[in-house]
Image (cartoon, rainbow, N blue to C red):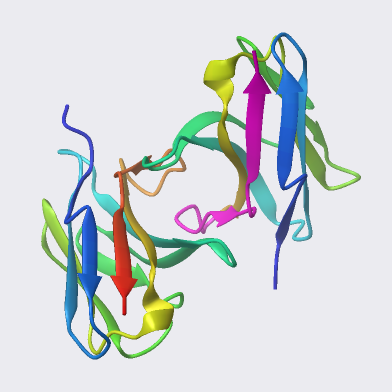
């Protein structure tokens, strides 16, 4: 049972372009939605996170957009750089179960110079 | 801060052998998580501990898997006997309390032949 569906599986973007990765969830009890970034040979690292009381959160070039009614959230990377090339995972957890993050399958982003 | 330390980085073993993976969480963190990453299933939570006590082990695939946390600075994940389908990258992560920001180690690449 996949509770967090992520798309696309892979993405190629030109340097300076906008990268967009989408996630959809099923469980309305989820109340925390982080994005993790993983470089080859490394563990995932928290990039940015949002709670459903806001529709958007921005940190530098990274923005999460959240649509509670559609049960969808997305990551936008503005002015994408080759150094952003990595695998990105969305995730979700619910109150009272913060230890159990449900991860999406990941999106491999390649930013071409 | 040395981060989460996992050992070994790579492990190659034969089917039927016992495998022990080790993790040292970040000092001061009292929650520890074991994840498994494969191409097919993505990142799966196997078990997590809070204050050295196992909280949820529902992700442990079979009785062949066991995890311990004898003290706040050390945890092990043991597979006995190992099988080829156990081949994966195993990550340990820690956090300060049952909060959502997880700090991952660099993982152990396990290959069971």
Q: Quadrant of residue A68?
A: top right
Residue B1 visible in rendering: yes
B5 relative to A76 in the view: left or right: left
> Up-down: is B2 above or below B12?
above
Residue A107 falls within the magenta-colored stretch? yes
Q: Position of residue A92 (x, y in %)?
A: 62, 49
> Up-down: is B44 above or below A108?
below
Quadrant (top left, top right, bottom left, bottom right) of the C terminus of chain A: top right
B41 relative to B95 in the view: left or right: right
Q: Position of residue B57 (x, y in %)?
A: 38, 75
Quadrant (top left, top right, bottom left, bottom right) of the N terminus of chain A: bottom right
Q: Residue at x 59, y 53 (%)?
A: A103
Q: Residue A59 or B53: which is nearer the viewer? A: A59
A60 relative to B66 in the view: left or right: right
Q: Residue at x 44, y 55 (%)?
A: A99
Q: Residue B107 or A63: which is nearer the viewer? A: B107
Residue A56 visible in rendering: no
Q: Residue at x 72, y 48 (%)?
A: A9
> Up-down: is B109 above or below B64?
above
Q: Position of residue B44 (x, y in %)?
A: 49, 64
> Up-down: is B55 above or below B8?
below
Q: Residue at x 45, y 35 (%)?
A: A39
Q: Position of residue B68 (x, y in %)?
A: 18, 71
Which residue range is magenta in the image?
A96-113
Q: Residue furthest right?
A: A70
| Count of numbered tags | 0
Q: Quadrant of residue B32?
A: bottom left
Q: Quadrant of residue B75?
A: bottom left
A66 relative to B41 in the view: left or right: right
Q: Residue A40 or B21: which is nearer the viewer? A: A40
């Amino acid at each position: 049972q996949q509770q967090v569906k992520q798309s696309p599986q892979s993405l190629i973007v030109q340097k300076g372009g906008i990268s967009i990765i989408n996630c959809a969830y099923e469980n309305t009890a989820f109340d925390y939605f982080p994005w993790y970034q993983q470089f080859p040979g490394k563990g995932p690292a928290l990039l940015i996170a949002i709670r459903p009381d806001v529709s958007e959160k921005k940190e530098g070039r990274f923005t999460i957009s959240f649509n509670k009614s559609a049960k969808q959230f997305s990551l936008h990377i503005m002015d994408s750089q080759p150094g952003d090339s990595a695998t990105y995972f969305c995730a979700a957890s619910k109150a009272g179960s913060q230890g159990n993050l449900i991860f999406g399958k990941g999106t491999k982003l390649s930013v071409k110079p | 801060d040395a981060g989460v330390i996992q050992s070994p980085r790579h492990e190659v073993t034969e089917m039927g052998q016992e495998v022990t993976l080790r993790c040292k969480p970040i000092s001061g963190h009292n929650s520890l998580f074991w994840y498994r990453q494969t191409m097919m299933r993505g990142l799966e939570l196997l078990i997590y501990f809070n204050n050295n006590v196992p909280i949820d082990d529902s992700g442990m695939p079979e009785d062949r898997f066991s995890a311990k946390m004898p003290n706040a600075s050390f945890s092990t994940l043991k597979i006995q006997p190992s099988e080829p389908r156990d081949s994966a990258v195993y990550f340990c992560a820690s956090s300060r309390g049952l909060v959502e920001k997880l700090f991952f180690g660099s993982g152990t690449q396990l290959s069971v032949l």
